[in-house]
């Protein structure tokens, strides 16, 4: 589904990603871990197509197509979803309106009819239960005045509505209490399909107790310094990152 | 990113065509003779000519104000023509006699003067350069005792009412541009709603400047008698030309006890091009006087004009009266807008509410200027002011000039202000959800303006949204 080969990217002229190689197949869950500032969010943003990042080398193939040549909205319409580490507020635009616009943009790209507000409400009400969200949240402005936890749940709600093929979750666990963490994790697990893949970006092991990854990668200094199975996460939990950083230094 | 936003805010002006029609146009120049000519042309009574002449003489002693945060080359008041009317417009002509060319012009602007063809209940007074071309639904309104006609006709047919209220809110000596308008105003709309009548449809005036060198000086007077209600709409467009044209209008509103007047404007005069060539100089005085328990509400969407100088205000004269001002002002290209409001609290328990949304893009400069004045007798007065600015790009500017004068300690005033930038991050967030850049900007801007748009009558809201190239929030919103 996703093949990243020797990817280099910089922001404002500063190289951040320095040669990432990673293959993600349908049905797999990959965890990308690593200390703060190691480039995890950068990788996520580059995959989603944030214009501030310049790709300086390597390639990213999504279902065989060159991601770098697709606009961010086209990537989204074709099933790439990023749950943001810091979801953005859009004052004055209701969550319901925003969600429906996003849903319809994807349908339109697929040549399907747009759904009207009533149909959409029925559809979204189902998904609200998944993330245990109060329907009143639909009528509030997108993320405006949401607590940290509400913002993260709202990201998963969007994911549930948009049913992406490749979901990238950037620190969706950070700032969540244990109940919220469980809700978010259950949501992600419920959305898992054999034809979809998930990349979980996190620097804590605890999320991986709820969403079990098939592979764990450790990012440091813009490179993947170690990959392994789910046991690697436990080892990181016990030993921290330093031993790995020393090993590659 | 900015490229897409610039394209959005730099749309081709849709109403820039001109109508080729034979007109009676006074040669450029301004003197007492000009004033006399206009008054004679309209067969005005002596009292009105006298009033105009007093205004003119006063104007000669006044100086153009230079305190607004706008710059422009000196205006040569002798270079404008002060009167222009299509030859085919006859005084008191019925709608059936309107020149097809004019009907066509209005049709192109989306205004049908054919009553049968109008689906929605909106009565229109169509003003073309210096004259009213026609007013629709007059008979229907007359059944309720409502007077809605051109200003010129009102002077002839309802002279006493006009004489009683003309200048009662904005005296001819009020300011430079109001004095000029009082001297040379050509036409405009007049509306009177009798006691206890709720006007059954929206009333509107559509102003069109056509002639190249003409200034437009229209005057609107709205009198809402005790316990009445009216919602009034105003639209304006002008052809695209390389020269600057002067527009100095006056709108006076009188809301007697327990009356409510809602006045909404979508101002879309030609703005000039991105190098600042051409565009309307828009210097407008709008003010209402609110008597006991009455309410005056101004809503404006200002998207056009090279320069806007405009402060729709309310004198809260009567106890418990309410004044509102909701504004979206866009300054893009090289536009300069200095706009806001004045709320003058005189009566007890008077309330005012100000919501201003300024959007600056490209090289536009947008200033909010507002004054809240609580006079000594205004026991229990309240004001809420919210003033938000949005910047699109790095070359534009947003400025706020709030003035507050409180002479009664029981007053409660709240002021909130914010400045935000349409960020790459906001746009990226929406794009990541599948929306294209245009939809993304539209959504962000429409969210920003929401509190103002919801004050507009439905039809107007749609027009305003289209103007900003944005989509209306659906019913689930
Ligand atoms: N605009 C920028 N200019 C320069 N450096 C940046 C910019 N944005 C992020 N960085 C740097 O890139 C590195 C990686 O950041 P990030 O991808 O957010 O890390 P992580 O998500 O792993 O914590 C950090 O050192 C950060 O300071
Ligand atoms: Mg991060």
Image (spheres, rainbow, N blue to C red):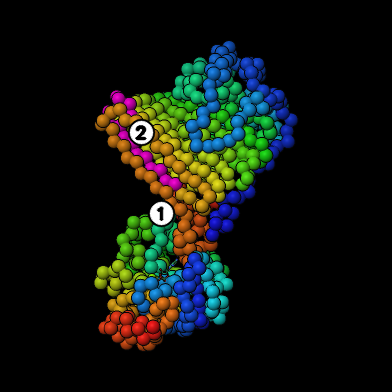
- Residue sitting at x 65%, y 24%: B78
Residue A90 falls within the magenta-colored stretch = no
In the rendered image, the vertical position of residue B375 relative to residue B300, given as above or below:
above
Left or right: residue B92 compared with residue B147: right
Identify the residue position indicated by label 2 in the image: B404
Quarter occupied by residue B59: top right
Residue B387 falls within the magenta-colored stretch = yes
Quarter occupied by residue B288: top left
Q: Residue B361 or B213: which is nearer the viewer?
A: B361
- Residue sitting at x 50%, y 78%: A7
Q: Which mark is residue A91?
A: 1
Q: Which mark is residue A171?
A: none
Per the rendered image, the range of residues in magenta is B374-389
- Residue sitting at x 42%, y 35%: B370
Q: Residue B461 or A151: which is nearer the viewer?
A: A151
Between marks 1 and 2 in the image, the one whose residue lies nearer the viewer:
2
Count neighbours of disc 1 (C-alpha within 10 A) and say few if under 14, some if 14 to 19, many if 20 or more: many
Q: What is the x, y in percent for residue B136?
A: 58, 32
> Element at badge 2?
strand
Q: What is the x, y in percent for residue B407?
A: 30, 27
Left or right: residue A157 compared with residue A104: left
Q: Does the closest atom of ligand 1 sit within 8 Å of the Cβ of label 2?
A: no
> Element at badge 1?
strand
Q: What is the x, y in percent for residue B173?
A: 50, 20
Q: In which chain is the residue bearing label 2?
A: B
* Residue A225 in sight: yes
In the rendered image, the vertical position of residue A77 relative to residue B339, given as above or below:
below
Outermost residue toward the front? A249
């Amino acid at each position: 589904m996703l093949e990243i080969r020797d990817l280099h990217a910089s922001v404002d002229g500063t190289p951040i990603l320095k040669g990432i190689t990673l293959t993600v197949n349908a049905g797999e869950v990959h965890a990308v871990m690593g200390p703060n500032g190691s480039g995890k969010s950068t990788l996520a943003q580059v995959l989603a197509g944030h214009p501030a990042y310049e790709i300086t080398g390597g390639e990213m193939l999504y279902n065989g197509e060159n991601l770098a040549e697709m606009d961010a909205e086209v990537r989204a319409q074709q099933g790439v979803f990023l749950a943001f580490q810091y979801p953005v507020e859009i004052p004055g635009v209701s969550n319901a309106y925003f969600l429906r616009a996003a849903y319809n943009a994807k349908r339109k790209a697929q040549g399907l009819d747009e759904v009207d507000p009533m149909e959409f409400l029925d559809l979204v009400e189902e998904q609200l239960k998944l993330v245990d969200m109060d329907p009143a949240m639909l009528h509030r402005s997108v993320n405006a005045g949401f607590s940290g936890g509400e913002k993260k749940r709202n990201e998963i709600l969007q994911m549930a509505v948009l049913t992406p093929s490749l979901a990238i979750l950037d620190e969706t666990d950070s700032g969540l209490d244990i109940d919220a963490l469980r809700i978010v994790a259950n949501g992600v697990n419920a959305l898992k399909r054999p034809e979809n893949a998930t990349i979980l970006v996190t620097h804590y092991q605890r999320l991986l107790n709820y969403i079990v990854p098939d592979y764990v990668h450790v990012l440091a200094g813009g490179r993947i310094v170690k990959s392994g199975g789910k046991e690697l996460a436990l080892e990181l939990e016990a030993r921290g990152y330093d031993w790995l950083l020393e090993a590659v230094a | 990113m900015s490229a897409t936003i610039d394209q959005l805010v730099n749309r081709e002006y849709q109403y820039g065509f001109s109508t080729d029609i034979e007109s009676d146009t006074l040669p450029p120049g301004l003197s007492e003779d000009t004033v006399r000519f206009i008054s004679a042309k309209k067969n005005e009574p002596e009292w009105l000519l006298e009033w105009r002449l007093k205004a003119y003489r006063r104007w000669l002693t006044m100086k153009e104000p230079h305190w607004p945060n706008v710059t422009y080359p000196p205006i040569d008041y002798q270079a404008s023509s002060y009167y222009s009317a299509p030859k085919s417009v006859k005084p008191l002509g019925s709608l059936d006699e309107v020149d097809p060319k004019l009907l066509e012009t209005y049709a192109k602007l989306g205004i049908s003067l054919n009553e049968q063809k109008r689906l929605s209940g909106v009565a229109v007074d169509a003003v073309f350069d210096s004259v009213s071309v026609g007013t629709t639904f007059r008979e229907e309104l007359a059944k309720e005792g409502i007077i809605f006609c051109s200003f010129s006709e009102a002077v002839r047919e309802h002279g006493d009412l006009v004489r009683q209220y003309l200048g009662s809110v904005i005296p001819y000596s009020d300011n430079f541009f109001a004095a000029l308008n009082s001297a040379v105003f050509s036409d405009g709309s007049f509306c009177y709603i009798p006691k206890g009548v709720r006007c059954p449809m929206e009333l509107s005036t559509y102003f069109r400047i056509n002639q190249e060198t003409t200034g437009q000086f229209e005057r609107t007077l709205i009198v809402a008698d005790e316990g009445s209600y009216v919602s009034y709409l105003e639209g304006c467009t002008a052809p695209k030309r390389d020269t600057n044209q002067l527009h100095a209008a006056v709108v006076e509103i009188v809301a007697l006890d327990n009356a409510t007047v809602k006045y909404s404007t979508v101002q879309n005069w030609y703005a000039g091009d991105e190098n600042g060539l051409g565009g309307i100089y828009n210097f407008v005085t709008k003010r209402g006087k609110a008597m006991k328990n009455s309410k005056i509400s101004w809503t404006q969407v200002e998207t056009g004009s090279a320069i806007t100088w405009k402060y729709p205000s309310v004198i809260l004269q009567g106890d418990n009266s309410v004044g509102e001002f909701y504004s979206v002002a866009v300054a893009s290209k090289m536009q300069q807008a200095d706009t806001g409001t004045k709320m003058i609290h005189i009566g007890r328990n008077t309330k005012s509410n100000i919501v201003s949304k300024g959007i600056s893009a490209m090289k536009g400069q947008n200033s909010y200027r507002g004054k809240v004045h609580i006079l000594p007798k205004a026991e229990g007065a309240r004001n809420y002011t919210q003033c938000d600015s949005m910047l699109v790009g790095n070359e534009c500017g947003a400025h706020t000039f709030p003035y507050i004068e409180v002479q009664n300690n029981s007053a409660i005033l709240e002021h909130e202000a914010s400045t935000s930038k349409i960020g790459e991050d906001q746009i990226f967030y929406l794009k990541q959800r599948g929306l294209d850049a245009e939809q993304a900007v539209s959504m962000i801007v429409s969210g920003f303006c929401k509190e103002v748009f919801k004050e507009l009558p439905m039809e107007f809201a749609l027009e305003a949204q289209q103007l900003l190239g944005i989509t209306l929030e659906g019913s689930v919103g």
